[in-house]
Amino acid sequence: MSAEFGVKLRDARAILLESAILKLQDIPLQNLIAQLNKQYIEVEVAEKQKEEAEKKWVKNFKVFQDFLFKDDLKYSHKPKQLNVIMFRLGSYAFRIEDSYFHNEYAAEIFAFVYPGIDIVNIFTNIIIGDLAVDELIFLRKIIQYDKKKIDFNLQGFFKASNHPKYKTFSQLNNAIYQTFVSETIPENYAGDSENPAESENLCKKKLMLLEVQGIDNVEESLGLFEKIESKYARELYGLLVCDEGYPFIPQRFALNHLKDNFGSREHFRIYVSNTGVLLVNLLNTELYKNYEKYQLQIADCFKDYEAEDRFGSHPDIAGLEHGALLAMERASILSVIIQDYLKKDFYSVDNSMKDIIENRKNLIEIINKATNINIDAMSELTDIILDKLGINGFVKKAREKLEFAEDAIQIKYQRRLSVVTAIIAVSGVFFTAMAIPEIKDCIISLCDYLISLGN
């Protein structure tokens, strides 16, 4: 690769995350697993291979320990926390058609199902390797925004040999979501569970996490990232927001977008935008090696036998270290839930009082989730992601919806009160009239006449 494409980045990898709302309640878990096994060749469920899975692809997902897995399990409408069922659906290879990129890339697919909150997240993990900044930006455009057509090799992924020729990651993810949609559509529903449009119309959120484990021409010392940001602010900004025009932006503009970051150690920083996360995780530096050596010495002294698992190897999945992927996923879940609720006509006076009150209760729950989210010690990172993804703005809109819902309840109440008042008034006139003998006799005669007509 030519040096004209910017500074070289080492050991790059990416996660394409898509979150979607599906109606999962009352679906037997075994039915869903059976459906996945029909569609995919190498389905793994985390509980069945829990020990191996935790080592291989669930490392650092500490909140994912409470699995829902029983033979007779029905999805519950009330989540115990954020319970999750994790599936590894398999892997495939792909090339980019008619492109500067000639390599074949490997992708590994996971689906995380959250029954209690009606969410299915699809993760596509891609090992990229060494690329220059410009190359990685354009590759991201292809993967996240379908900039070019993709030649997928799905022979080891789907069981069916006659599957459609998908040409973008969006098309392929829609096909994966269709597996879940086919289980969630009731038999009496008029829609077609095999129609891809059913999955295309889901309320979704798509984000990308990029992890870079090395940057060329960086002088190692304490204060490493202050030097990196000073030297490569434009490049980092370009990677973060997927902007190939980064060489022409003002330095102060780039630095301003990078200032809200998270890094509890000298060897990594996490940057966030409204399109995803950039993790610069410099594992190939002497700075990190010295840190790892120090941690292992401390662990040996205090007989912390789990330290070798934490420092001896690094996961192949982008963003698992330092909580970057976990925080991004949680923010994505909140984002898609809030988007789905904001689309609903909560305050329509045509809704029943019961519906409006239920919607109001749901809105309060959503606001509480968004404002009270906390992931262990990562609250600072989570706050940054929530802000950059516009969750705080969503909360403001949700509060406005809540006010409208309260107004709608008041209108419904006033209407109901007016009707009751009218009924009481009419009833009062009727019973007053019945108390007058002459009017009472006329009403009785009229009723007898009407009854005789009916006979």
Image: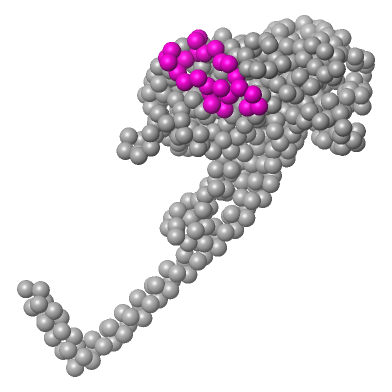
Tell me the quarter of the image containing the C terminus: bottom left
Q: Nearer the viewer, residue 245 or 389?
A: 245
Q: Which quarter of the figure is the N terminus placed in?
A: top right
Q: Identify the coloring.
A: one colour
**Residue 453: horizontal and vertical position, in percent?**
9, 77
x and y percentages locating residue 340 in the rendered image: 55, 43
Question: Most prominent secondary structure in the magenta stretch?
Answer: loop
Read off the magenta span: 146-173
- Residue closest to the far front: 98
Indicate whether residue 159 is drawn in magenta: yes
Tell me how many marks there are. Answer: 0
Left or right: 313 in relation to 439 = right
- Above or below, 101 relative to 261: above
Q: Does residue 250 lie above or below 431 as drawn?
A: above
Question: Could you tell me residue 190's position as x and y percent?
Answer: 35, 39
Q: Which residue is found at the position 54% from the left and 26% from the top?
A: 171
Towards the viewer: 18 or 391? 18
The quarter of the picture where residue 383 lies is: top right
Q: Depth check: give the residue in front, 350 or 366.
A: 350
Q: Residue at x 43, y 15 (%)?
A: 162
Q: Is residue 265 visible?
A: yes
Picture residue at 65% right of the left edge, 47% below the top: 395
Q: Is residue 409 above or below residue 78?
A: below
Considering every residue shown, the one lying at the far bottom of the view is: 438
Q: Residue at x 32, y 34 (%)?
A: 187
Q: Is residue 436 left or right of residue 2?
A: left
Location of residue 243 by image quarter: top right
